[in-house]
Amino acid sequence: MINEKVTIQFSPSLGIFFKHYYGIISLEDIRSSWEQIFYTDLIPSETKGFVVDYRNAVMNIPPGQHARIAEYYKEHLEVFNNRKIAVLTENPQNVVISILVESKDEGYQSKPFSTMEAAVRWVLS
């Protein structure tokens, strides 16, 4: 557990890094949780991609600020470069934000999914 809003898990058999969010999530929560993961070197070198699970969370991101998520990923291409980030969500607001972020992808790929199976399949494809 990173904090009360984020848990992480790495699957060695899949090579996927899973990040699960809980509750109301802000841009700062997204940024600071990744920073903590980077600072403590928790992403194994054999990571093929990421599944970021928002099914138990709601993104509280002001209109027009979705681009800041894409900018953050671009600022950290040492981690995300040529990797896929599957965004797992069922909340319509989160889906819209995820699609808007996807439209800004550069150097990595992101895409929203509603099932874990589809998300994992895409990351491994």
Image (cartoon, rainbow, N blue to C red):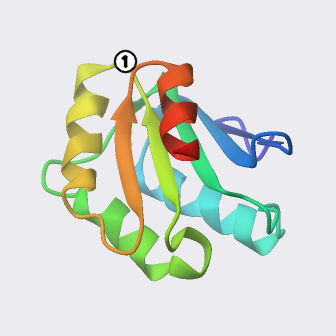
**Left/right of residue 102 with respect to residue 39 in the rendered view:** left
Q: Secondary structure at mark 1?
A: loop
Looking at the image, residue 3 sits to the left or right of residue 102; the answer is: right
Q: Quadrant of residue 6?
A: top right
Residue at 36% x, 60% y is 69
Q: Where does the image place residue 63, in percent across and percent down from the top left?
A: 14, 48
**Residue denoted by label 1:** 90
Q: Is residue 53 visible?
A: no
Q: Image height check: is 116 above or below 65? A: above
As drawn, 29 above or below 14: below
Q: Amino acid at mark 1?
A: Glu
Q: Residue at x 23, y 28 (%)?
A: 93
On-image quarter of the N terminus: top right
Residue in view at x 75 percent, y 41 percent: 14
Residue depicted at 57% across the width and 41% down the height: 51
**Residue 118 at what x, y percent from top left?**
48, 25
- Is residue 119 visible in the rendered image? The answer is yes
Q: Position of residue 110 (x, y in %)?
A: 38, 51
Count of numbered marks: 1
Residue at the far front: name it.
Answer: 125
Near mark 1 (Cα within 10 A), the count class, few <14, some 14-19 or many ≥20, is: some
The residue nearer to you, when weighing 80 against 37, is: 80
Where does the image place residue 12, in percent across and percent down from the top left?
A: 86, 45
In the displayed orientation, state which residue is furthest to the left. Answer: 64
Q: Is residue 50 above or below residue 6?
A: below
Left or right: residue 61 compared with residue 77: left
- Residue 117, quarter of the rendered image: top right
Above or below, 89 against 29 in this view is above
